[in-house]
Image (tube, grey):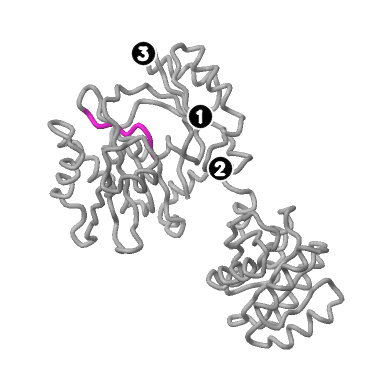
Amino acid sequence: MNLHEFQAKQLFSKYGIATPHGQAVTNGAQARQVAEQLGGHRWVVKAQVHTGGRGKAGGVKLVDTLDAVADAAYDMIGQNLVTHQTTAQGLPIHQVLVEQPSDIQRELYLAVLVDRVSERVVFMVSAQGGMDIETVAAQTPDAILNLIVDPVVGLQPYQCRRAAFFLGLTGNTFKQLQTVMQGLYRLFTENDVSLVEINPLVVTGHDELLAVDAKLNLDDNALFRHSELAAMFDPTQEDDAEVIAQKFGLNYITLEGEVACMVNGAGLAMATMDLIQKEGGQPANFLDVGGGTTADRVAEAFKLILSDNKVKSILVNIFGGIVRCDLIAQGIIHAAKDVGLTLPVVVRLEGTNAELGRELLANSGMNLHVAQDLTDAARQAVAASKE
């Protein structure tokens, strides 16, 4: 789950990480009021959407008058922001963050993430802040320092000092970096975070460190422990079908193809998608209905699939281990009738009572095609999508 920038900064403040003074608002009048309260002669208005590259896409504006603050907020709110990380439709802007500008002397990069290779929490540090870290890693990998944290002892002071020396910090900022890194590590572990990124972390003219931007991703599997963070979820920033899928315990991701998949098991779903591509098609989604598949869950899965108008055929690939294949077949038939399914559906069943399940499908009188194996199923589904 992603947090908005202003939400991440609220969390930063609880862990002693300094951020610019500001407030999120939902209209131009509120933006002007906040700017007046902040004082000064310049302000930054930032669109709150779950994507990077906002500045290049017009989602960050530096303005010099109170009227310009209100106008910038008015121009952004209600629009969709399209960046290199979004789809062509972009993401809706429902609120903006109004902040005081920062006296930036240097821009640094600091992130904490889970490294799957080392199976550890890792700090990534670079003096090339303000740039895409992927570009830095590709062009100048030596500009990034990776610090692996032992979970038994946690982040150590010598690692913070090593990062400070690597960044060329001195004086007050040298000491502050340890406070920032220790705060980030506590934030990361106590809130089950999967990624936190500050880009840039700036050195101000007053020799202080300030988190000008903030990106924070939470581990969905641990949200049951953090109800206050789960309440920050913004469904408008997610695909509608994916939000609905979460309500019914379905793992669903929208893709760009034309062959929809309905599978029980994430690994089997990945293999199914690979075979569709091998046979010359493109998967329209990733959809794992889970091991304890029921008729109701299958019906909701069909509804999700049919909400995508790109879909031309459907491949159902079910292994009947926990539940019997004949019950799965009955669920598919009932669900197809309930949703008025007209698209061709290719079904591959394997496991307990698989033969009985295939007979029920074949005798259903509906547009349901039984496949004997997964390769055959993928070939039929791709062919059906092209007819």
Q: Which residues are magenta?
A: 208-214
Q: Which residue position is annotated with label 1?
A: 59
Q: Position of residue 194 (x, y in %)?
A: 38, 53
Amino acid type at mark 2: Thr
| Label 1 packing within 10 angstroms: few (<14), some (14-19), many (20+) | many
Say above or below: 269 vs 48.
Answer: below
Give the label on residue 370, or none.
Answer: none
Say above or below: 333 vs 188.
Answer: below
Q: Which residue position is annotated with label 3?
A: 40
Q: Nearer the viewer, residue 137 or 313?
A: 137
Amino acid type at mark 3: Gly
Q: Position of residue 293 (x, y in %)?
A: 63, 73
Q: In the image as oriented, which residue stretches furthest toward the front? A: 139
Give the label on residue 86, or none.
Answer: 2
- Mark closest to the chain's N terminus, 2 or 3: 3
- Mark closest to the chain's N terminus, 1 or 3: 3
Amino acid type at mark 1: Gly
Mark-to-mark CA distance, 1 and 2: 13 Å
Does the magenta portion include 2? no
Q: Position of residue 13 (x, y in %)?
A: 31, 36
Q: Quadrant of residue 91?
A: top right
Mark-to-mark CA distance, 2 and 3: 34 Å
